[in-house]
């Protein structure tokens, strides 16, 4: 295992590259066939996506692609597209009609900093732009790769993935009964797991991995995603608002069933650690050897993070 | 010119094919890699996209592709993807934070029939699914065509197109001064023009049109889109709520500058008729001859429509 500080340094370094790339993509000059980039909308899209976040998802794209020797613009742009989807989902989830949150990453949420209509449109704009970035030749010269990326991201982010997970999450609050463990696992696999898994699947698509390698990486992504979400439940139960940059204890307040409420804090921690082991085992199964170390570190990092 | 009844019949027939295809695409069985299709969300996506509408955009995709001898599933699926984008935009634009409309196509708007959160997510789901449909091999065997369609639709629907146009429209309401004619034309080209133009561009992409043909078709699409929007302004000023299926007279009520308020009713009608002529001339410039008649009829239909 790598030193945690070294891993953090690498993560930060990538976050800076992602920030700079997002800043360029969300520049003020219209692209070909764009009629104009209305400034207030663009500002809101920039606000919702720049200036924060660990950029874990782009990091996973970039490090997964690196397993196959692929570096440079392609994984960076795919990482940015994925981050746009993640950021749009936060802007929409924070809306008054949804989770009604005022604070995100220690800053006012997009609808607080702008207004509700602008936050809805900024989310729509980021969601749409993600597919623009993926389909652009600048991302990859092979149209087959671009089309695969679009399909995989749309499927991970849509009705049968992230958007569906958020719908299940909202439904759970008004269901009048706590969710079962299976229902929670499905919800979490959709709401947060699908995008995390896409991150490593994207690396395999970009790197033209063998089918066996792609499947092993996908198992890693699924375990990592599940570990991420248990860690989230643990943080909400045990974390503090200042470190989180968002309000802690919300789940219990809302009477929401989580893995912590079902398994207890120790049970949840045991599950989290088991998922990290599964993630590491899946990486070993790729047969790619020592280059997988950074993704192993990522699984440990995700499980142990404080925010 | 074709008999208007014959054109209407053809439009209706296509609308039925589109309705059936959307119904299949929005079925209850999850696709590969979809974890589940949560039923309430799916119902809202179906509500927002099924059971109404002239399906003008899919019609234009299908008839543009037919110019190049292409018929069947490909243009139908592309038309459905485009219609999903159109329908998501209606669901989001109707939200209380946006235009705050209760009525659409004579039925309660999506947030009225369900709730705000579900309407936001249903819109997000339709937007995402549109790109899923385009990127799927079932749409076209050539990945180059699929990637081009994704890029063109994302650019037409996003920040520099439809979403940007809606942002400008909202900004106009609080600007404290009426928009200039140029500002209105930009807004309209973005808000409604870009998607209508994409419809015919998609036909050219699917049909692998020559560059000169694609450009001429694109000019047709731009003129048609502009004619559509002048006709909309005229309808809002002169139409009645029952025929429209939505409230008439809203523009004047809101003190909104439109081409009718700037050019007068007769001036707007003259401009509309000139745009139809431009659309027809652009079709003649394709050199494709009599097969373009149905698209000429479409321009006349768009200008003369009552809702």
Image: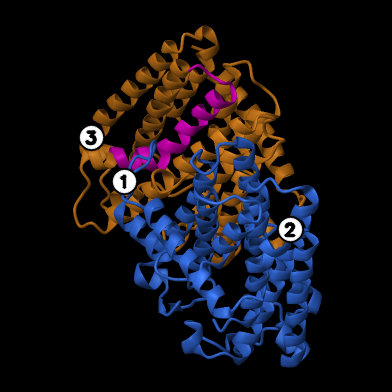
Chain colours: A orange, B blue
| Real-space CA distance between mark 2 and mark 3, rounded to the nearest whole angstrom | 71 Å
| Real-space CA distance between mark 1 and mark 2, rounded to the nearest whole angstrom | 42 Å
| Nearest to the observer: residue B273 or residue B149 | B273
Tag nearer the camera, 1 or 2: 2
Q: Kindly identify which chain the residue marked by label 2 belongs to.
A: B
Residue tagged 2: B288
Q: Residue B172 at x, y = what percent?
A: 69, 76
- Packing grade of label 2 (10 A; few <14, some 14-19, many >=20) is few
Q: Residue B54 at x, y = what percent?
A: 50, 71
Relative horizontal placement of residue B252, taking residue A31 as reference (left or right): left
Mark on residue A264? 3
Q: Which residues are magenta?
A: A185-210
Residue tagged 1: B29
Q: Residue A240 at x, y = what percent?
A: 42, 42
| Nearest to the observer: residue B246 or residue B19 | B19
* A248 relative to B242, above or below: above
Q: Secondary structure at mark 3?
A: helix
| Real-space CA distance between mark 3 and mark 1, rounded to the nearest whole angstrom | 35 Å
Q: Quadrant of the C terminus of chain B?
A: bottom right
| Dominant secondary-structure state across the stretch colored magenta | helix
Identify which residue is drawn at 61% across, 55% down.
B66
């Amino acid at each position: 295992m790598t030193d945690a500080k070294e891993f953090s340094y690498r993560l930060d370094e990538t976050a800076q590259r992602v920030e700079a790339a997002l800043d360029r993509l969300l520049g003020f000059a219209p692209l070909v066939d764009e009629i104009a980039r209305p400034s207030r909308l663009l500002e809101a899209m920039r606000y919702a996506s720049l200036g924060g976040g660990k950029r874990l998802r782009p990091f996973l794209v970039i490090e997964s692609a690196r397993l196959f020797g692929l570096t440079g613009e392609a994984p960076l742009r795919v990482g940015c597209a994925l981050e746009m989807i993640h950021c749009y989902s936060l802007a929409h989830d924070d809306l008054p009609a949804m989770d009604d949150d005022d604070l995100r990453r220690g800053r006012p949420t997009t609808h607080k900093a702008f207004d509700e209509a602008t936050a809805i449109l900024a989310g729509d704009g980021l969601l749409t732009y993600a597919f623009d970035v993926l389909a652009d030749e600048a991302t990859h010269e092979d149209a087959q790769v671009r089309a695969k990326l679009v399909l995989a991201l749309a499927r991970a982010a849509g009705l049968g993935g992230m958007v569906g997970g958020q719908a299940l999450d909202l439904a759970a609050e008004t269901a009048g009964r706590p969710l079962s463990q299976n229902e929670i696992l499905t919800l979490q696999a959709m709401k947060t797991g699908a995008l995390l898994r896409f991150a490593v699947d994207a690396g395999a698509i970009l790197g033209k991995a063998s089918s066996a390698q792609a499947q092993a990486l996908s198992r890693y992504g699924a375990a990592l995603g599940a570990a991420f979400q248990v860690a989230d439940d643990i943080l909400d139960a045990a974390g503090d608002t200042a470190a989180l940059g968002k309000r802690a204890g919300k789940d219990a307040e809302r009477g929401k069933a989580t893995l912590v409420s079902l398994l207890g804090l120790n049970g949840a921690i045991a599950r989290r650690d088991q998922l990290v082991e599964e993630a590491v085992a899946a990486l070993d199964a790729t047969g790619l050897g020592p280059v997988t170390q950074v993704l192993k570190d990522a699984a440990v990092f995700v499980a142990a993070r404080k925010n």
